[in-house]
Image (cartoon, rainbow, N blue to C red):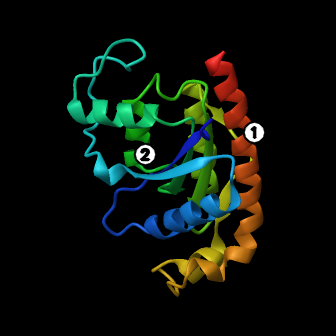
Amino acid sequence: MSNPKIAIVIGSTRDARFADKPAQWLFSKAQELSSELDFELVDLKDFDLPMFNEMASNLWMPSSDENAIKWQEKMAEFDGYIFVTPEYNSSIPASLKNALDQAGKEWVRKPAAVMGYGAVGAARAVEHLRAVVINLQMVPVRSAVYISGSDFFKVSPLGANGEMSEIEAGILPSVEAMLGDLAWWTKATKAARDA
């Protein structure tokens, strides 16, 4: 039997985004640390999503935009998600909120974890994202990864632009806890959905 599949979703689409560095690091670490889950890096930039303009969520009627449908089909492949997000004005980027709105039935009864980054570790964005995923009928896992303060400025181009290995010791326990929570909830929700 194959492992459940987890999407690591890069939630920012800005040209100057920092997201690629922590997302790539997390993808490598997750593969190294978890033998129970399979991971795929998914970049919102690859989907060219319009702003949500459908009559309703695809929970209620099929979407008409072909890029939205392509996104929905991709998200349907997964049993859980890790969203990598910055914090913009105390919330998640519009690109991530729009991507979440563009799918509906694909999210239902699947777990969502978060890695946030920024001066305060995207703590406010992570909390906002948890509220959003609850409304999408997802299960937010408790443990999250926050890259904040001096750690953020060590690896960000806004600071020293160092390698993720420079802050790994500080964030690795959070990554391990998040992956443990995600593995448990992914297996539990998948078994329940399959039943």
Give x and y (percent) for residue 125: 57, 50
Q: Distance between the residues labelled 1 and 2?
A: 25 Å
Q: Is residue 3 left or right of residue 187?
A: left
169 or 142, nearer to the observer = 169
Residue that protrudes farthest toward the front in the picture: 1
Q: Which of marks 1 and 2 is in front?
A: 1
Residue position marked by numbered label 2 in the rendering: 96
Give x and y (percent) for residue 104: 44, 25
Amino acid, disc 2: Leu
Indicate the quadrant containing the N terminus: top left, top right, bottom left or bottom right: top right
153 or 193, nearer to the observer = 193
When asked about the image quadrant of residue 4, the answer is top right
The residue carrying pointer 1 sits among few (fewer than 14), some (14 to 19) or many (20 or more) residues within 10 Å by Cα, namely some
- Depicted 82 relative to depicted 104: above or below: below
15 or 87, nearer to the observer = 15
Residue at the (64%, 83%) spot, across then down: 166
- Is residue 126 visible to us here? yes
- Depicted 50 relative to depicted 53: above or below: below
Residue at the (64%, 55%) spot, across then down: 123
Residue position marked by numbered label 1 in the rendering: 184
Give x and y (percent) for residue 31: 61, 59
Residue at the (22%, 31%) spot, across then down: 66
The residue carrying pointer 2 sits among few (fewer than 14), some (14 to 19) or many (20 or more) residues within 10 Å by Cα, namely many
